[in-house]
Amino acid sequence: MRSSNTSLVTNTGDSPELVLVFDGDCGFCHRAVRLILEQDRRRLIRFAAWQSDFGGYLRRRFPLLERIDSVALYEKAAITGIERITTRSDAILRLAGRLGGPWRILQAGYLLPKSIRDGVYTWFANHRHRLSGRDDHCARPLPETRRWAEQPPVPGEPAERRPS
């Protein structure tokens, strides 16, 4: 892996699978997931808590994620299968770009040095439970949304065929 923020580079030309992995015990994270569910009109993004089977799979697959307890964006290219993990401010900015529309304005954050972006992100991540409360269980959206990446991926099986 290159750094703790990126594991592999993905080919952006082939419709990646996107999974936002978040802290299932964080009230702020739950509210953010609900907001993203509402804003993701194209239904591109799926979700998994770090405490889920999928979160555990990612930590085993990418050992540097053991140090991450806040947010990560997992992308897997549909055609090539190349994977990418982004964390901290890079994950948030990349997610904003995927949401499109007015959310893309947040990508102006790339103009700031990464050390500053990640410093602000890390401060917030370290204080998020005190700032927003702690949930004792993972929030679930309505079952019909089917946007939860519960199971680890099966090698060679397309994302759209996996149960969600």
Image (cartoon, rainbow, N blue to C red):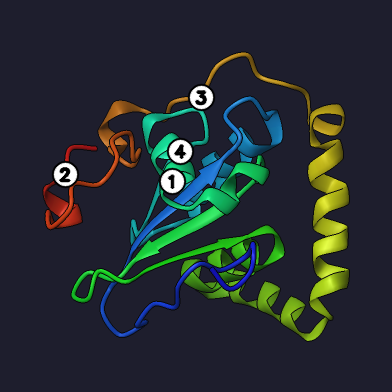
Residue appearing at x 22%, y 76% in the figure: 80
Q: Nearer the viewer, mark 4 or mark 2?
A: 4
Q: Which mark is residue 58?
A: 1
Image-based side of 153 in relation to 27, left or right: left
Tell me the CA gap for discs 1 and 4: 5 Å
| Residue 99 locus on image (x, y percent) | 49, 66
Q: Nearer the viewer, mark 3 or mark 1?
A: 1
Of callouts 2 and 3, the N-terminal one: 3
Contact (Cβ within 8 Å) of mark 1 with mark 4? yes
Which label's residue is closer to the chain start, 3 or 4?
4
Q: Name the amino acid, label 3.
A: Ala
List x then y, in percent, for residue 157.
Answer: 12, 54
Looking at the image, is 4 positioned above or below residue 28? below
> Closer to the observer: label 2 or label 3?
2
> Reading the chain from its start, which is encountered first: label 3 or label 1?
1
Residue 16 position by quadrant: bottom left
Q: Nearer the viewer, mark 2 or mark 1?
A: 1
Q: Circle 2 sits on which residue? A: 162
**Callout 4 secondary element:** helix
Q: Residues within 10 Å of mark 3 (few under 14, many from 20)?
A: some
Q: Which residue was labeled with disc 4? A: 55
Which picture quadrant has residue 140?
top left
